[in-house]
Image (spheres, rainbow, N blue to C red):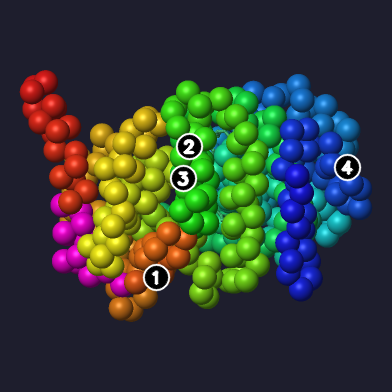
């Protein structure tokens, strides 16, 4: 399956297939030097395949620390200096081979190396169906996530689904949150359809027909980012579940998607309270429980701490905390939500999980 962006210029293809990596040749042939920047876990899982690939492309391998720990200044400095020791020209291509963290990091390298060289995304996680499209790249600061970065389009996104086979279920759950978010943005039918298809953890683990849902997710994201690349308007809708989710993620260091799912749940509660929608909260909780999302964290959250983290969100403006709410199926809006309303929604969220607190007390 293939999609193509529809910007005025500098468009790029997104190929979503098993064995999509075979298409890489056609995108690297114009470069003098090619470097693969590879997540250490991914290299460990696929070393033979990757060695064959780099040989075939006469490319160099740069293995970076697995996951989020790579998105630092220290790693940026080390990788940059190592790249620059090769007497590079602008005819250099950087290929990111890994999850969202690798894509963000390698993309930021590509954007800033000699003020911009070629960049290709080869995502290896479910979550990266989201992060590899749209051109946001960057690293973290001690002041927060993704605070140092750029908008930089890749030349191609080559999503070879064979890489997903080694993903631990925890990472499947993390990535599925963004796939589910894209279905929510598409409306009620899309949401019911995905829930019916992935109706248990066994079914989700099987990754059966995941390619269809990844494709739909990418299509949804693409539609939004092509309209609003620099996040002046509708790109904000992609933050559904992220205001509360990011706060939980920072506070408790849990995987991004697990936190986003909790943020999505919270958003339904705020929407019911503020917009008088009638989302069935218990239905969503049951769904998340049957997929095995670790919701035990919810009764452990502290309102003041979570609220302080929400205040740090870079999407806020001078009027306070901005949240995306589904005012109706598939129709998001961005609203300011004040502290009193947050507290009310927070208390309601925790009230669904008091039995967990009681259970913990009995255990003691
Ligand atoms: P990740 O890159 O940290 O990968 C998660 C874990 O899975 C890591 O431990 C990694 O080593 C491992 N892994 C990767 N591929 C694997 C495979 N095929 N088999 C086994 N293990 C594998 O995280 P992620 O969830 O892919 O992405 C999260 C990152 O994406 C965050 O840094 C987030 O800020 C970023 N993000 C960016 C955007 C964007 O628009 N740029 C959007 C959403 C998220
Ligand atoms: Zn996200």
Q: CA distance from mark 3 to mark 2?
A: 6 Å
Q: CA distance from mark 3 to mark 1?
A: 24 Å
Please name which of the two marks, 4 or 1, marks the residue nearer to the observer: 1
Q: CA distance from mark 2 to mark 4?
A: 39 Å
**Residue topped by disc 2:** 196
Mark 1 or mark 3, which is nearer the start of the sequence? 3
**Residue topped by disc 3:** 192
Q: Quadrant where the C terminus lies?
A: top left
Q: Secondary structure at mark 3?
A: helix
Mark 3 lies within 8 Å of ligand 2 (Cβ measured): no
Q: Secondary structure at mark 4?
A: helix
Q: CA distance from mark 4 to mark 1?
A: 42 Å
Asked which quadrant contains residue 294, the reply is: top left
Residue 61 appears in the figure: no
Please name which of the two marks, 1 or 2, marks the residue nearer to the observer: 2
Any magenta on residue 342?
A: yes
The residue at 39%/70% (across/down) is: 334
**Residue topped by disc 1:** 334
Mark 1 or mark 4, which is nearer the start of the sequence? 4
Identify the magenta region: 336-347
**Residue topped by disc 4:** 25
Mark 4 or mark 2, which is nearer the start of the sequence? 4
């Amino acid at each position: 399956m293939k999609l193509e962006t529809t910007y005025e210029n500098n468009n790029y293809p997104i190929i979503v297939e098993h064995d999509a990596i075979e298409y890489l040749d056609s995108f690297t042939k114009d470069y003098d030097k090619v470097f693969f920047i590879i997540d250490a876990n991914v290299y460990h899982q696929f070393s033979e395949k990757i060695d064959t690939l780099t040989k075939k492309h006469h490319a160099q391998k740069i293995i970076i620390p697995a996951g989020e720990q790579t998105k630092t200044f220290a790693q940026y400095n080390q990788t940059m200096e190592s790249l620059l020791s090769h007497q590079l020209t602008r005819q250099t291509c950087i290929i990111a081979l890994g999850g969202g963290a690798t894509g963000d990091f390698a993309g930021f390298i590509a954007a800033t190396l000699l003020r911009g060289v070629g960049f290709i995304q080869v995502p290896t996680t479910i979550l990266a169906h989201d992060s590899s499209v749209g051109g946001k790249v960057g690293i973290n600061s001690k002041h927060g996530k993704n605070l140092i970065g750029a908008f930089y389009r890749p030349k191609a996104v080559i999503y070879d689904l064979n890489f997903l086979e080694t993903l631990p279920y925890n990472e499947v759950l993390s990535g599925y949150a963004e796939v589910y978010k894209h279905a929510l943005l598409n409306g009620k039918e899309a949401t019911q359809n995905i829930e019916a298809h992935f109706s248990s953890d066994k079914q989700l683990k099987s990754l059966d027909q995941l390619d269809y849902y990844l494709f739909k997710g990418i299509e949804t994201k693409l539609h939004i980012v092509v309209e609003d690349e620099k996040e002046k308007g509708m790109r904000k809708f992609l933050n559904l579940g992220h205001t509360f989710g990011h706060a939980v993620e920072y506070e408790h260091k849990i995987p991004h998607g697990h936190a986003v799912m909790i943020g999505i749940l919270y958003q339904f509660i705020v929407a019911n309270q503020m917009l008088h929608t009638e989302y069935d909260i218990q239905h969503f909780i049951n769904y998340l429980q049957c997929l095995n999302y670790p919701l035990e964290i919810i009764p452990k959250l502290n309102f003041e701490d979570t609220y302080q983290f929400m205040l740090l969100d870079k999407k806020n403006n001078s009027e306070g905390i901005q949240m995306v709410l589904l005012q109706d199926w598939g129709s998001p809006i961005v609203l300011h939500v004040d502290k009193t309303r947050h507290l009310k929604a927070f208390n309601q969220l925790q009230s669904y999980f008091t039995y967990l607190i009681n259970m913990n007390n009995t255990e003691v």
